[in-house]
Amino acid sequence: MSELPGFDAYARQYLTEAREALADAYILDGLRRAIPLLLEARAARRHVFLLGNGGSSSTAAHFVTDLAKVASRGEGPKIRALGLTDNVPSVTAIANDVDYAHIFADQLKVYGGPGDVVIAISGSGNSPNVLEGVRVAQSLGMRSIGLTGIGGGKLKGMVDVPIVVPSNSMQHVEDVHVALLHLVTAYLRDAGPVSTG
């Protein structure tokens, strides 16, 4: 095992790697494709569902708050954001009575419909319950955005709009996901609502 550098050198390296991942052109292209889906969902009063495991679960819950509160300021339609990680009784009942892989899919079968959007967050892109949620969302006519990293995993090929952080470090992947969600929130807030008519 190599000797750990001093903290200052370690911090510089960590922040440089995170900055390089955040600046990747592929990420910007994904965001360009994701924004219209969210603007259309807001204008049409469709739901935007968020889901993820572990750290990605907290990122999903954070983004629900930002979309529903910050990005929905002012007059006009609001973003109807819902976190499928937040209904703990439903999550535990489905995990116990059906299977943990269905905790998001079974909720989407109840609440989701055509024109809704699902934002699936998985650092590895291989979380079975996230993949099953996306599969069901697509069968219901929903659009899908995937935030992932570490090569994108299976999620990259399943969603309409993949946004893959070019890093094999879960810390950098999660850092960048939060920064991107704040960027999206700020843009939607400043763009304001758009009319469907």
Image: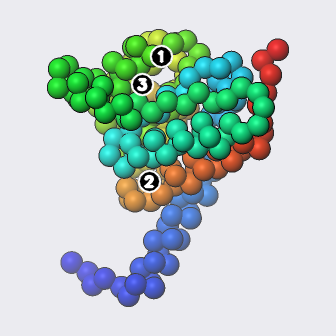
Mark 3: give few (<14), some (14-19) or many (20+) Cα within 10 Å.
many
Picture coordinates of residue 42, whole percent (x, y): 67, 26
Q: Residue at x 31, y 33 (%)?
A: 88
The residue singled out by tag 1 in the image is 112
The image's mark for residue 134 is: 3
Q: Are marks 2 and 3 in contact (CB under 8 Å)?
A: no
Q: Amino acid at mark 1?
A: Gly
Q: Which quadrant holds residue 71?
A: top right
Q: Residue at x 56, y 54 (%)?
A: 179
Question: Which residue is nearer to you in this view: 2 or 120?
Answer: 120
Question: Which residue is nearer to you in this view: 39 or 150?
Answer: 39
Q: CA distance from mark 2 to mark 3?
A: 20 Å
Q: Residue at x 61, y 20 (%)?
A: 46
Q: Earlier in the sequence, mark 3 or mark 1?
A: 1
Q: CA distance from mark 3 to mark 1?
A: 11 Å
The residue singled out by tag 2 in the image is 174
Mark 1: give few (<14), some (14-19) or many (20+) Cα within 10 Å.
many
Q: Amino acid at mark 2?
A: Glu
Q: Residue at x 41, y 46 (%)?
A: 58
Picture coordinates of residue 189, whole percent (x, y): 72, 42
57 is higher (above) or lower (below) than 39: below
Question: Which residue is nearer to you in this view: 48 or 89?
Answer: 89
18 is higher (above) or lower (below) than 55: below
